[in-house]
Amino acid sequence: MNNKDRHIGIVWNIMLALQEDNDTEQALSSALEVLKGELNVPSACIWLLNREENKLYAAVSSGENSIAGYSISAGYGLPGEAVSQNRQICLASTAGDARFPGGNDEVTGIKTDNVLYVPLRLPHETVGCLQLVNRTGGEAYSDEELSLCSTFCGLAAMVVSEKGFAFSSDNSRRVLLSFRNIIKEYPSGTEKLRVLKGVDLDIYENEFLVILGESGCGKSTMLNIIGGMDTMTEGTMLVDGKDFSHPDERQLTEYRRDFIGFIFQAYNLMPNLTALENIEFIAENCPQHGDPKEALALVGLTDRAGNYPSMMSGGQQQRVSIARAIVKEPKVILADEPTAALDFTTGRDVLTVIEKLVKEKHTTVVMVTHNVEIAKMADRVVRFKNGRIASIRINPWPASASELIW
Ligand SMILES: Nc1ncnc2c1ncn2[C@@H]1O[C@H](COP(=O)(O)OP(=O)(O)OP(=O)(O)O)[C@@H](O)[C@H]1O
Ligand SMILES: [Mg+2]
C-alpha cells in the first residue's frame, strides 16, 4: 500500500469512529484512539473551547495521565495559544523550555518530553485543539502525519459543531458562592500591588474543593475574601444567588458567624479554657449552633473534654479547632493549610475528620494546601498561579483520607 492509500485508509477509519456514536464525547474518544495508534502516541487530548465561560475543557483525554475534565482559562498555556492564535505548535523537545519546569507540564504536572498542538478549525472559528504528548521515541512528525492530524482536526471540529458538546462543568449542583472578576490590591509604597488579578470561581454545595499553588500566588487572600475576613478591591460575590459584593458591617459579621467556619494552620485555641469550653465559647456566640459535646465526639476527642490546650498534641488541638468550626454548623468550612504543622499520622487524622464533615454533615469545604497528595481527596482542584486561576480539575474518583501517603 502506498502512502496515499494508507492515508485514505486511516482517514476512513477516523470518519467511521466519529460516526459510530451519537455521543460527541464517545465519538471523539474512539477517533482519537485510531489516531494515537497510527502515530504511536501514548497520551492525547482534545481541548474544546467554551466561549460563554471563556475556558478550554479537556473534553476527551486518554493515556497514562488522562486529564479529562480539566479546564483552563481560554488563552492560557500552549493549548490556549494554539486555539487563540489558530496555529499548530510542535515542540520536538521540552528540555530547557521554561513552560515545562523540570520537564513537567506546568498545568498538569505530567512529565512531558514532546508535544504537538493542532487547532480544531472550522471556516469561521476555531473550536479547540488536539494535543499529542510524548510521541514514542521522540520521532519527528512527517509532513504526511501532520496533514493527517489536520484532517483529523477538521473532521472532529465538524462533529463538535454539528452535534454540540456538553461541557463537563457540573450544572446539576447548586452554586453556593459565586465570584466574578475578583481583584485585590494592597498598597505598596506609592504603588499598588495587585495580588488577585481577576478570579472567577463558583463553589458548589457540599463539595470538597482544594486550592493549590505556589507560595505568594494569592491562595490565602482568596480564602479570606471568601470568608468575609478581607474585602476585595473589585468584583462581584454572590451568596446563595444574592449579591454580597458590598456588605455592611452587620451583614459581614452575620455572614462570618453563621455561614462560615474557619480552620487555620495555627489552632488559635484559648489557653485558659478546656477543649470543651473552647467549643462552648464559640457556640454561645452563635444563635444557631450544634451541641458542643457532639462536635467534640465527631473529632474523636470526647475523653479530652477537660484538657487544656497545653495538655494536647498539635493534632488534637487542630481537631478541637475543627470542632469549634463545626459547632457553628456553617454551610462552608474554610481551611488554610490545616495539616501543615502536623506530622503525617496526625495530619491524616485531621483530614479524616474533614472528610467526615463533607460526607456526613454535607458541609462544603474549601481547603488551601501545598500538598499535592491531599488534593487527591478533592472533588475539584483549583490551581492558582500568580493571582489567577490557571486550571480547575474535576476529580472523578476522589481518594479517601485513609489512602493518602506523604
Ligand atoms: N495585608 C497585606 N498587605 C500587603 N501585601 C499582602 C498582604 N497580604 C498578602 N499580601 C501579599 O499578597 C501576595 C499573596 O499573598 P497570599 O498570602 O494570598 O499568598 P499564598 O498563596 O497564601 O501564599 P503561601 O502559600 O505562602 O501561604 C503576597 O505577595 C503577599 O506578600
Ligand atoms: Mg497562604
Image (tube, grey):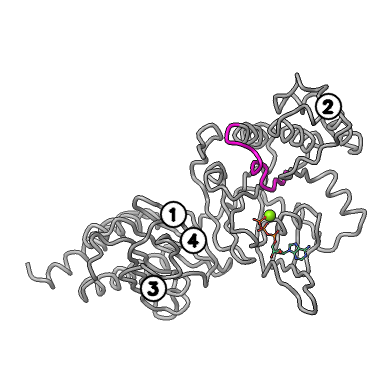
Q: What residue would you read off at disc 3?
A: 119
- Image quarter for ligand 1 equals bottom right
Q: What residue would you read off at disc 4?
A: 107
Q: Quadrant of the N terminus?
A: bottom left
Of circles 2 and 1, which is in front? 2
Instruction: Answer whether residue 19 is visible to the viewer in this image.
Output: no
Three-letter amino acid code of the residue under disc 2: Leu
Q: Which residues are magenta?
A: 332-345
Q: Position of residue 217 (x, y in %)?
A: 64, 62
Task: State which quadrant residue 78 falls in.
Answer: bottom left
Q: Position of residue 76 (x, y in %)?
A: 51, 70
**Tag 1 secondary structure:** loop
Give the distance between the C-alpha atoms of the residues marked 2 and 1, in whole angstroms: 45 Å
- Up-down relation of residue 37 to residue 343 (above or below): below
Three-letter amino acid code of the residue under disc 1: Ile
- Up-down relation of residue 297 to residue 5 (above or below): above
Q: What residue would you read off at disc 1?
A: 67
Of circles 2 and 4, which is in front? 2
Instruction: State yes or no: discs 3 and 2 in contact (Cβ < 8 Å).
Output: no
In the orientation shown, which residue stands out farthest toward the front? 310
Give the distance between the C-alpha atoms of the residues marked 3 and 1, in whole angstroms: 18 Å
- Foreground pick, 57 / 170: 57
Give the distance between the C-alpha atoms of the residues marked 3 and 4, in whole angstroms: 19 Å
- Foreground pick, 264 / 127: 264
Of circles 3 and 2, which is in front? 2
Q: Position of residue 338 (x, y in %)?
A: 68, 42
Give the distance between the C-alpha atoms of the residues marked 3 and 2, in whole angstroms: 60 Å
